[in-house]
Amino acid sequence: MIFSWFRSGVVALGALFLSGGPVQAAELPTALQANTLRAQILPRQYTTMSSELPARLEKLPLEEGARFKNGDLLASLDCSLQRAQLEKARAALTAADKLREVNSKLLQLKSVGELEVVTSGAEAAKARAEVAVMTATVAKCAISAPFSGRIVEWKARPHQFVQAGQALLELLDDSILEVEFIAPSRWLQQIKPGSPFTLHVDETGQAHAAKIIRIGAKVDAVSQSIKISGQFLQAVPGLLAGMSGRVVMDLPAAAP
C-alpha cells in the first residue's frame, strides 16, 4: 500500500476540509506528512506583452508590482512617424474621392470615358485601404491590459528602442490562484475532479484545503506521471504566485 493513514490523521484532515481554513503543518500527524508531492502556486492567467512595431518605448505608466484593470494603458510607443503617415493617407483618400466624384459627373456630360471613372474609383479604394492599414498600425502604439492583474516585471525600459515582437511586460492575474503538481499516473484510478487535498505552503508555514479541478490530458510515458491542477476551497489572502509547498492527499484506495 502507498499510504497508511493513522485514524487521528484522517480525523484531522477531515476537520480541515470542513473548516476550509488554514492550519499549521505541525498540527498534522507525521503519517499525513509522508508520501507527499511538491506543488507550485500559479495564476490562472499570465502572459507577456510584446511590441508589434519597431519603435521607441515612450513610457510604462505602471511600476513593477502595480495593479491594473482590464483595458488600462500598460505601455505607449513613440509613433509620430506612423501618425504622420496616417495623415498623409487620409489626405490622399480625400483627393482620390474628389477625383472620383468629378469623373462621375464628367461621365454624365460625356467629357470622360468610363475607364477614367473606373480608374479613379480604384484609386479611391486603394487610398481607403491605406488609411485602414495606417489606422490599425497607430492603434498598436498604445498597449492595453488584456485582463485585470498585476505587473510582474518590466522586460524593457522607457526610451529604449524596441523591435517588433520584443517583450515589454510580464503580467499575471492573481485573482484566481491554482495549485499545480505532478502525480504518479497510477493515481488516476483513485482521483477525479473534485477530489480533496491539502497544500502545505513553505513560505507561510500554513496548510490550506483545496480540490482537484483538472487532470492532464496525457501521461508522461517515461516518468509515468501526469499534471494535476487544483484550486483552494476559499480565498487565501497572502498567497502569491510562485510560492510552493507539499500536497497531501488521502486517497480512498491505495494502488499496489
Image (cartoon, grey):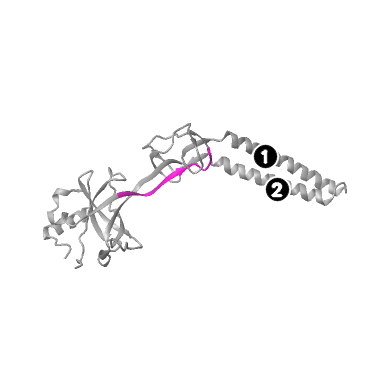
Quadrant occupied by the N terminus:
bottom left
Quadrant for residue 4, please give it. Answer: bottom left
Q: Is residue 21 visible?
A: no
At x 78% / y 51%, what residue is drawn? 118
Mark-to-mark CA distance, 2 and 1: 12 Å
At x 33% / y 49%, what residue is drawn? 42
- Going by the numbered disc 2, the residue's amino acid type is Ala
Q: Are marks 2 and 1 in contact (CB under 8 Å)?
A: no
The span shown in magenta is 41-54
Give the labeled residue for mark 2.
125
Q: Position of residue 141 (x, y in %)?
A: 53, 39
Q: Position of residue 202 (x, y in %)?
A: 22, 46
Q: Is residue 206 above or below residue 91?
A: below
At x 14% / y 48%, what residue is drawn? 26
Quadrant for residue 204, please give it. Answer: top left
Give the labeled residue for mark 1.
90
- Going by the numbered disc 1, the residue's amino acid type is Arg
Q: Position of residue 179 (x, y in %)?
A: 29, 52
Judged left or right of residue 22, residue 54 is right
Q: Does residue 44 show up magenta in the picture?
A: yes
